[in-house]
Image (spheres, helix red, strand yellow):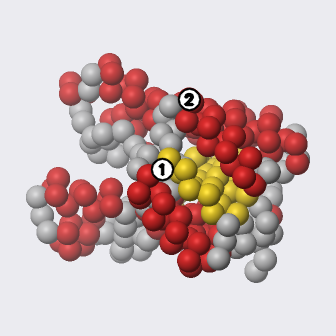
Amino acid sequence: MDLGLRGKVALVTAASKGMGKACSLGFAAEGARVAMCARTEGDIKNAAEEVRAKTGAEVLAMTADVTKAEDVKSIVARTKQTFGRIDVLVANCGGPPRGELHQMTDEQWYRAFEVSLLSVVRLVREVAPLMREHKWGRILTIQSVSVKQPVDGLLLSNAVRPGVAGLSKTLAPELGKDNITINVVCPGRIMTDRFLGGAKQAGMPVDEYVARSAQDVPLGRIGTPEEFANVCVFLASEKASYVTGVVIQVDGGMVRGIL
């Protein structure tokens, strides 16, 4: 199936590993040019080289922290300077820490807002004018199933991330006038370094942790970054041109709510 992404330019943040890198590989495999950024220079350079080697795509690697306004402006400007346009944004960022109400300081609450919501606002604000120039754009923000269903122990995520769904719903009519879609993609348990780090926190071997974590997933297993990326690539394609303002989970059926 031709997804209509050949020659498009995709900007993927937090792209050095996990779901961000998998999305970059997915877009590159479809013939898109990809701009990738992450905070650690060595990691993003290695990830970009992997994408180039596997796909032959044009790839731009940048070091940036998307919680910093100046870094957001810089990566958007550099992507436009290098490729001339931005067609797809995948706004990805690490999540807030675990903790209960009595453990969370005001500073941690502000940080959670900046990481999960304000970084998305800044990225969308910078790329939307570029997409409007071409009357075509796809904006995806990677969040968590906590948008749909609270996750035990993730107070900050449960409280802040649903705001991104409200942002998406609110912006969909405005952006839709210029043929730009905006959607929220919510991973459940995906086999990333962050997920596997839970084994150490739980004090159990990785294999046991993975097996236990899969028990309440209807499909009976943990998803892969590639499976998650497949959904993102589709949503960014011409084939998903009538999908906007939605929140879709990629979770193996773990969220049981009807809406």
Residue denoted by label 2: 69
How far from the left and from the top, in percent, is residue 227?
52, 71
Residue at 62% from the left image edge and 38% from the top image edge:
74
Tell me which amino acid carries mark 2. Ala
Q: Which of these two is toward me, 217 or 206?
A: 206
**Could one spot residue 22 in this view of the protein?**
no
Residue at 58% from the left image edge and 47% from the top image edge:
91
Cα–Cα span, label 2 and label 1: 14 Å
Place residue 35 in its image quadrant.
bottom right
How far from the left and from the top, in percent, is residue 132?
85, 41
Residue at 88% from the left image edge and 48% from the top image edge:
134
How far from the left and from the top, in percent, is residue 15?
50, 56
Q: In this view, does 40 lie above or below 123?
A: below
Label 2 Cα neighbours within 10 Å, binned few <14 / some 14-19 / many ≥20: few
Circle number at residue 38: 1
Q: In this view, does 203 lie above or below 95?
A: below
Count of numbered marks: 2
Q: Which of these two is toward me, 161 or 237?
A: 237
Tell me which amino acid carries mark 1. Ala
Q: Give the left or right position of residue 177, taking residue 255 as reference.
A: right
**Could one spot residue 45 in this view of the protein?**
yes
Circle number at residue 234: none
Place residue 207 in its image quadrant.
bottom left
Place residue 166 in its image quadrant.
top right
- Dot 2 or dot 1: first in sequence order is 1
Q: Is residue 27 above or below residue 150?
A: below
Q: Quarter holding the N terminus?
A: bottom right
Secondary structure of residue under mark 1: strand
Residue at 67% from the left image edge and 66% from the top image edge:
58
Secondary structure of residue under mark 2: helix
